[in-house]
Amino acid sequence: MAYFVYLLAFAAMEFTLTFLAAERLGYGPMDNAKMFVFVGLTIALVQGGLVRRLAPKLGEAPLALAGMLLTLPGFLLVGTMHGAGQLYAGLALLAIGSAFVMPSLSALVSRLSPADTQGLSLGIFRSLGSAARAAGPILGGALFFGAASEAPYVLGAVLLLLPIALVRRVKGPAVPAL
């Protein structure tokens, strides 16, 4: 459920981001491309450099929680932005948070599932992710074009309170002392 709600909000944000950047900053295709390259490189650097080092020390649940706590203000910064600096600050928080959340939740499902149902658990997990990726753009588009341009971002921040609460309750595998 935490993954579904997180990814629903994230997919709504991703879908509407180019519309928001065009509306608020006059961004065109090249500006949008630079924005997504920035996000992609940030995610790759954080996952490759930090997550793989921190997960064995801290555990996946604390990393997922930290990622969600970074993502929440990222949603609000991007949704209320009126300048490129604020946009990129919000995108940095979203990218770093996402880089923590996605692999950590996947690892938690794998680690916490009994061996005989691990495949089923991971299949359900991935199916919920696919459903969120399908529904997120519909929700985001409806909010962006039907309510207000900041609506998908504000609602996304509010929705993140549910996965934050759920992940706080996870008792992950034992983590070695630092």
Image (cartoon, rainbow, N blue to C red):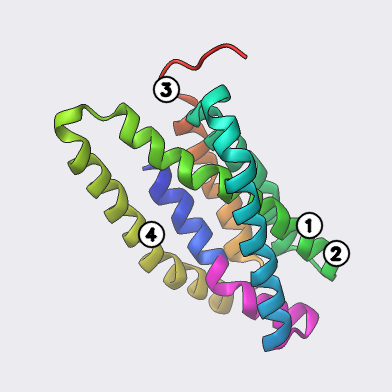
Residue at 60 percent of width and 55 percent of height: 44
Q: Nearer the viewer, mark 4 or mark 3?
A: 3
Tag 3: residue type? Gly
- Which of these two is toward me, 27 or 37? 37
Residue 174 location in percent, x, y?
Answer: 44, 15
Tag 4: residue type? Ala
User: In the rendered structure, which segment of residues is drawn in magenta?
Assistant: 14-28
Q: Are marks 4 and 3 in contact (CB under 8 Å)?
A: no
Horizontal placement of 42 versus 62: left or right?
Answer: right
Residue 118 location in percent, x, y?
Answer: 22, 36
Residue 68 location in percent, x, y?
Answer: 58, 42
Disc 4 packing (10 Å; few <14; some 14–19; many ≥20):
many
Q: Does the magenta segment cover residue 116?
A: no
Quarter of the image that includes the N terminus: top left
Label 2 – label 4 distance at C-alpha:
29 Å
Residue receiving disc 3: 172
